[in-house]
Amino acid sequence: MENDNIAVGLDIGTTKIVAMIGKENEYGKMEILGIGKSKSLGVHRGVVNNITQTIQSIQQAVQDAETSSGLKIKDVVVGIAGQHIRSLQHSDYITRTNSDEVIDEEDIDRLCNQVHKLVMLPGEEIIHVLPQDFKVDGQAEIKEPIGMYGGRLEANFHVVVGQVSSIRNIGRCVKSAGLELSGITLEPLASANAVLSQEEKEAGVALIDIGGGTTDLAIFKDGIIRHTAVIPFGGNVITEDIKEGCSIIEKQAELLKIKFGSAWPGENKDNEIVSIPGLRGREPKEITLKNLSKIIHARVVEIVEQVYLEIKNYGHEEQKKKLIAGIVLTGGGAQLQHLKQLVEYITGMDTRIGYPNEHLAGDTDAETTSPMYATAVGLVLNSLQSRASFSPTKSFADMEASEGKKETVPEVEDEADETPKERKRFFDKWAEKFKEFLDNAE
């Protein structure tokens, strides 16, 4: 798979592992060449808790993707989520030795590098350092300081932190599955890339990605990521509640949720009943859809209220931080009936379901444009954009490079201007650094 414009995303989720191969077509859209899916057995709430089972699930998904595409997968970009992820705001500055020279990538590199030296809690590591806005000699609200004159360069940063052991375990699983790890991205950022438009990011939007084990939140305003959070509840707790409430097995509970589940109890009549086959010759169980949706409703309200609390903590009520584009729901859990109406009712914010079809080629299979594949599509997109060296938000690949060595990497001939080449160099440095980190972890 030597082709430069082909990338592979690996979404290691709590319920499923997806390997997706994509390439950029001549129209700048993403074409999906192959997709593989397997049941995720060794992951709980976004964190690997069984290395052997996770390796087998990854190999199965990768094998399926290789079969459907006819390509051999060597390296992948992996998404990271889980309840260990937290984020914080931080401000930092550097004083430049020569204010007669314009600010360049090296200065931003140095400033981000400084943030990476922040002292974290034991066992934690900085995953992303995302600049919000810059100040040059006291002049505020600068989005792109490159090319300006100034002696003091300041920035506000959104710093995403995670457990070293969890990140290492994911890296270990990928390596043991016979793959190279070419990048690692926070899953809410990948999903946002797949389902949000630039206009929404400018206006202010909250992306809620409801997965099996976790619900991820990413808030954008003025085109910049402002807040991220991972809530340790997802679709699995709803299934668990149905299983307990109706005294049925998990497989039946999951099917009930998908086929007949609704987040709004008022929609079902009292006489609507579904019959569930009994176990081993036992009598079938009859469950009213009204009761089923009451069970689902109670848990979904809890998840949405927790997410809304995070949005309010960001300061959505303030005029300056108002999210005009409202909420976008994605992930497998977003397919629950009447969820959109319930979220609008609880939050009072405009809501839509996010499908990852904005950046996909027109002839893409309908199943692939389902919200449950948003993260996988986003990971492939992020990887393709890093290779073309353009990313709307400075991603982990860009920022992590600041810890890399300052060697020069031969630049690829490109018709684009200087900055993309510069960012390509960033990505290469980071990839080397990360591989080194994994080798030392062995």
Image: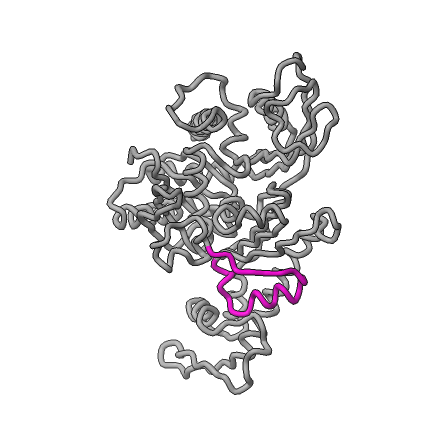
The location of residue 208, given as percent across then percent down, is: 57, 54
Residue found farthest to the bottom: 271
The residue drawn where x is 34% and y is 45% is 21
The location of residue 56, given as percent across then percent down, is: 34, 47
339 in the magenta segment: yes
Residues shaded magenta: 332-355
Residue 436 visible? The answer is: no
45 in relation to 435, above or below: below
Task: Place residue 89 in its image quadrant.
Answer: top right
Viewer-closest of 3 and 165:
3
The location of residue 414, given as percent across then percent down, is: 39, 27
Viewer-closest of 211 and 282:
211
Task: Place residue 428 in its image quadrant.
Answer: top left
49 in the magenta segment: no
The residue drawn where x is 73% and y is 23% is 137
Residue 55 visible? The answer is: yes
| Total numbered labels | 0
Horizontal relation, residue 75 to residue 264: left or right: left
Quarter of the N terminus within the rendering? top left
**Colouring mode (rainbow / by chain / secondary structure / one colour):** one colour
436 in relation to 317, above or below: above
Horizontal relation, residue 178 to residue 41: left or right: left
Quarter of the C terminus within the rendering? top left
The residue drawn where x is 47% and y is 43% is 79
The residue drawn where x is 46% and y is 46% is 378
286 in relation to 417, above or below: below
Viewer-closest of 169 and 415:
415
Viewer-closest of 8 and 139:
139
